[in-house]
Image (cartoon, grey):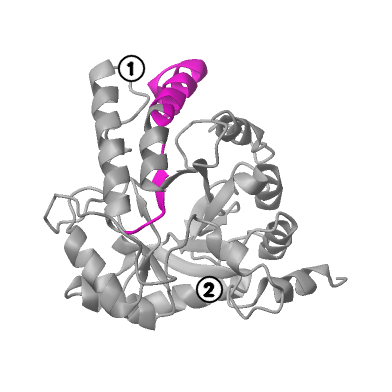
Amino acid sequence: MHAPSDFTNSRRGFLAFASMAAGACLSGPRAEADESSNTSSSTPWLKKTLKAGMIGVKGSWEERFQAALDAGFVGVEPNTGNLDVAALRAAAEKTGLIIDGTVGGYHWSVTHTNPDPQTREKAQELLHQSLEQTAALGAKTMLLVPGHGKDGTAEEVRSRAFDAISKAIPLADKLGVHIVIENVWNHFLYDHGGDENQSAQPLADFIASFGTDTVGVQFDLGNHWKYGDVAEWVETLGSHIQKLDIKGFSRATGSFTDITEGDIDWDSVRQALVKIGFQGWLAAEVGGGDEQKLAKIAGQMETALHCSKTFAEVSAEVKQPA
């Protein structure tokens, strides 16, 4: 994952938050999964969303949101920070594209695990502002990179990350926003120089240590193919997974790829997701572009994980003998 870029649209000042259009955002990041638990439902088991910075269409937010919708997406995740909340909400309400979550726009440059207490204090302030902005947008999750392993010893980094998130939980609960941690290349809770046989257990244990589902995982299915089996990570993290990110990765070249052009075994990933009962948001995190490129990405998401099928259909599919 690359460091996220800030948006250039300008207005700070958070609006009083409310739900998006009726039925668009429910009570939590996996509420859509609960809603579609009836196996006769026609609801897709995975809802396609994307990072807002991927929409390479010129024009207003309304025009950009419409392009994403036309390309096959139903949600969008903007970066927190310097953005126009009113314009984003208006664009979502006019087009029907759901702002399902946000991505912390500061957490690479101002880390929660920095050795400097003043830097950590600034990061805490930005985390609280990001949670408020997320709620003002009507979104339900804020993706967080909790720190960087190079900021100190493993124990120091873990302790600082734990403290920062713990301090934010009361506000997150008040706002109805979940903090979802992404597994990224940040040298935290895995061995960056290690092999591809690593376990997700350290990450699962870290999430469990908070004792609340206000903190979960937005599991990136491509980020850790370099370090472990994706299906095994899914099963280990289980109910801690509240949302998903998707990209491709090739172990042969050691590089990220388009979703279907790497060597990830998507069949085994589907099986693992069915096994843990996951249903909900799947966010593309790859290089974006115009509407044609976005439609290609949406199609690759379908090819990899059969997003538009119901949970019952995918369950039956993966249980068939090879």
Provide the secondary structure element on which disc 1 rests. loop
State the residue at coordinates (22%, 47%): 81
Query: What residue sits right under mark 1 in the picture?
Result: 115
* Amino acid type, label 2: Gln
Image position of 279 (left or right of 223): right
Expressed as whole percent of the image width and height from the top left, the position of residue 306 reads 62, 74
State the residue at coordinates (36%, 73%): 97
Tell me where residue 287 sits by quadrant: bottom left
Mark sitting earlier along the chain (2/1): 1
Q: Are marks 2 and 1 in contact (CB under 8 Å)?
A: no
Q: Which mark is residue 250?
A: none
Provide the secondary structure element on which disc 2 rests. helix
State the residue at coordinates (42%, 18%): 152
* Amino acid type, label 1: Pro
Which one is in front in this view, the residue at disc 2 or the one at disc 1? 1
Query: What residue sits right under mark 2 in the picture?
Result: 300
User: In the picture, which quadrant includes the C terminus?
Assistant: bottom right
Q: Is 269 above or below relative to 217? A: below
Q: Is 162 above or below relative to 31? A: above
Expressed as whole percent of the image width and height from the top left, the position of residue 304 reads 61, 69
Q: Which residues are magenta?
A: 138-166
> Residues under labels 2 and 1: Cα distance?
41 Å
Image position of 308 (left or right of 182): right
Disc 1 residue crowd, few under 14, some 14–19, many 20+, Cα 10 Å: some
Expressed as whole percent of the image width and height from the top left, the position of residue 245 reads 50, 56
